[in-house]
Every structure is written in C-alpha cells, then in structure tokens.
Amino acid sequence: MFALVKTDGSINLFAPYTIWQDKNGTEYSPDHLIVLTSSEKQDLGIYDVAYANRPDDRFYTITQNDPIFDQAEKIVKVTYTSVAKDLEDSELKKEWIAHVNNMANNILAQSDWMLVRKIERNVDVPANMVTYRAAIITEANRLTAGITAATEVGQLIPLVNVISWPTVE
C-alpha cells in the first residue's frame, strides 16, 4: 500500500497498480509509480505504508485507526485499537467448545469402523488404537475444561491456538 500525504495533512491510502494522484491533484497511471525513486515519490507526497500487527478478530473487536504520517521515518503508519471480547456475554466459549468437539469427533470417526467391527464380528480393536482414541477424548476434555474455566481472552488464546492432538502409534 501507498499513501498520499496532502499538504493539509490529510492522508489517503491507495493500492499499487491503481490510478493515483499526487499532493497537487495531478493524476498518474499505475505504471508511473513503479519507476519512481523513493525521493521522487516523497516529492509528490507519496509514502510507503507500514501496518501494525492486527490483533486476532476471533478474540478481539478491532478498529483500524486513522493513518498517521511519521515525519522522522518518512512513512505512514496504520495501527489498530482492539478490545477483548467478553467471554461470559458472548458465544465465544460455546463456539470454541463446539469446534474442539467437532475436531475430536472427526478424528475419532476415522477409526470408528474398528468399533463396528468389534460389535458386529467380535474382532478386537488393537491396543494402540484404544489408547489413541482415549488420548483424543482426554485432549478434547482437557481443552473443553480449559475453555470453560477461562475468564478472559488471554487465557483462551493459548488453549485454542496450539491444539496438539495425539497421533496413533
């Protein structure tokens, strides 16, 4: 992204490869921007844009702040204001518990045929699969308990961002 910093201090963001205007209102073709040096762009009021890390909108309500021109660094900065979602008043916990249970069910479904085979034909389920399935259920229960116990977003994020399902041995 690029930004046009006008003489009145207002800032307009624009994407590369679009028709753009300089600080005096002169219109240019998209290709013209590519051939300009950094100092030539700055003479026209054009600066690069640096975006701050955007918080995860699964957990935060986010507002993009107005761009700010950093005169010292010769760059336009875009930052965000975020407010953590309320775990108790939102559906966030319910959604994550449903997501964890759905993932566990999908993993278990891959070996359900072994249980059917046991019921219908009395063929034993291999011990490693019994252990594996129990570990999946244990992990789902651990995650569900952690999600339920979380009182703030900061406790929820590490639980759901790094889910490590057991693997079959």
Image (spheres, grey):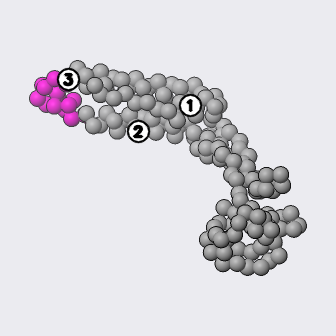
* Residue in the foreground of this view, choosing between 35 and 148: 35
Region rendered in magenta: 112-126
Q: Position of residue 128 (x, y in %)?
A: 25, 22
Considering the numbered disc 2 on the image, is that residue within a helix, a strand or a loop? helix
Q: Position of residue 33 (x, y in %)?
A: 67, 71
SS assignment for the magenta stretch, majority: helix
Q: Earlier in the sequence, mark 3 or mark 2?
A: 2
Instruction: Determine the CA span between mark 3 and mark 2.
Output: 24 Å
Displayed quadrant of residue 91: top right
Determine if residue 18 is in view: no
The residue under label 3 is: 126
Instruction: Determine the CA span between mark 1 and mark 2.
Output: 19 Å
How packed mark 2 is, by other alpha carbons closer than 10 Å (few <14, some 14-19, many 20 or more), is few
Considering the numbered disc 3 on the image, is that residue within a helix, a strand or a loop? loop
* Residue in the foreground of this view, choosing between 17 and 42: 42
Q: Residue at x 21, y 29 (%)?
A: 115
Direction from residue 142 to residue 77 in the image, left or right: right
Q: Residue at x 42, y 26 (%)?
A: 139
Displayed quadrant of residue 74: bottom right
How packed mark 1 is, by other alpha carbons closer than 10 Å (few <14, some 14-19, many 20 or more), is few
Displayed quadrant of residue 21: bottom right
**Residues at circles 3 and 2 in contact by the CB criterion of under 8 Å:** no
Considering the numbered disc 1 on the image, is that residue within a helix, a strand or a loop? helix
Q: How many marks?
A: 3
The residue under label 2 is: 102
The residue under label 1 is: 158
Looking at numbered disc 2 in the image, what kind of residue is underneath it?
Answer: Asn
